[in-house]
Image (cartoon, grey):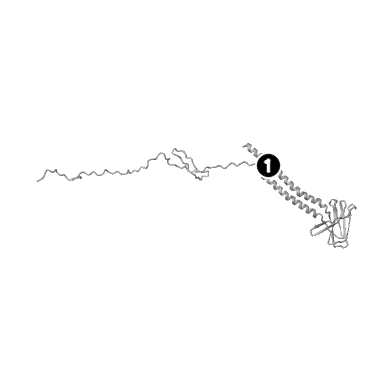
Amino acid sequence: MTDESQPPSYGQGPYHGQQPQYGQPPQYGQPSQQYGQPQQYGQAPQQYDQPQQYDQYGQPQYGQAQQYDQYGQPQPQYGAPQYSAPATPPKIKPSLWWVALGWVIFVLSIGGGILVAGVGAVNTVTGLAPTKPFASGETVSVSIDPEEQPAIYISTGKALNYECNIAGGDGKGRLVQSASKQTVTDGSRTWQMILKINATKGDYQVTCKSDEPGAEVYGVGREATAAVSGLMGSVAAFFLIPTAGFLFALILNIVIVIRRSSARKRLAVGG
């Protein structure tokens, strides 16, 4: 017998005998299209470098690109401060080298005075010795000038008797015995003055001989007193030349200092 108290069953459907299952709501993943972060305001937009610069030869110029802010205004460039070289002060003329030149000339004048005095003294002394020796019994022609104080010299290694004569000129020349014993050394030979010549200016012939011919040599030179004037000239040169150099340096120094002082005042007035 059929129990007809139960409702008829239908074929099993998806929910046969069960309550319909409601699962989790569909999961929606991230959208496939990825969106970046939203633009942040207050930050500078992307900065772009300036285009490449080229010089007059077509070569690229390198350097730091200009930076711009969010408003398109160029940003100031910061770096090491640039200092210009200080202005060169104007030179004051004349140069101090002129002062140095004056004192250099003074030093040179000292050396020049010593040189001139030394050479003059040597020439004066050596000029006393006979320049034309002659033997015993020989006659020699000489030019006599009384201003040079001529004299006859003998060079011998022993004492002997001699005799000399002078002729020519105006015929009034004579020989005078020397009261002093003067000697002059010329190289390896030593001369001793024996007679003075008193004669007017002119050409004369002088002859000397001794009782022992060949043991002596004669010659006509100058008295030693004739060297006094020459030596005085040498001494004068020794002092006068350096003095002139010193005065030149001193005057030049004063002139340079005055002119430089005037130049400084002109620069001060001109700013």
Q: Left or right? Give the position of 29 relative to 214.
A: left
Q: Position of residue 17 (x, y in %)?
A: 18, 45
Residue of label 1: 257
Q: Pick the quarter of the image with the C terminus.
A: top right
Can you name the residue that lies furthest to the front here?
A: 180
Front position in the image: 162 or 34: 162
Q: Left or right? Give the position of 52 relative to 124.
A: left
Residue drawn 66% across the image and 40% down it? 261
Q: Position of residue 50 (x, y in %)?
A: 47, 42
Q: Position of residue 133 (x, y in %)?
A: 83, 58
Q: Quadrant of residue 249?
A: top right
How many discs appear? 1
Q: Amino acid at mark 1?
A: Val
Front position in the image: 64 or 84: 84
Q: Position of residue 75 (x, y in %)?
A: 47, 40
Dot 1, crowdedness within 10 Å: few (<14), some or many (≥20)? some
Residue drawn 68% across the image and 42% down it? 257
Front position in the image: 6 or 238: 238
Q: Quadrant of residue 196?
A: bottom right
Instruction: Judge whether 161 appears above or below 43 on screen.
Output: below
Residue drawn 78% across the image and 53% down it? 121
Can you name the residue that lies furthest to the left here?
A: 1
Q: In what element is the residue under mark 1?
A: helix
Residue drawn 70% across the image and 47% down it? 103
Can you name the residue that lies furthest to the right here?
A: 171
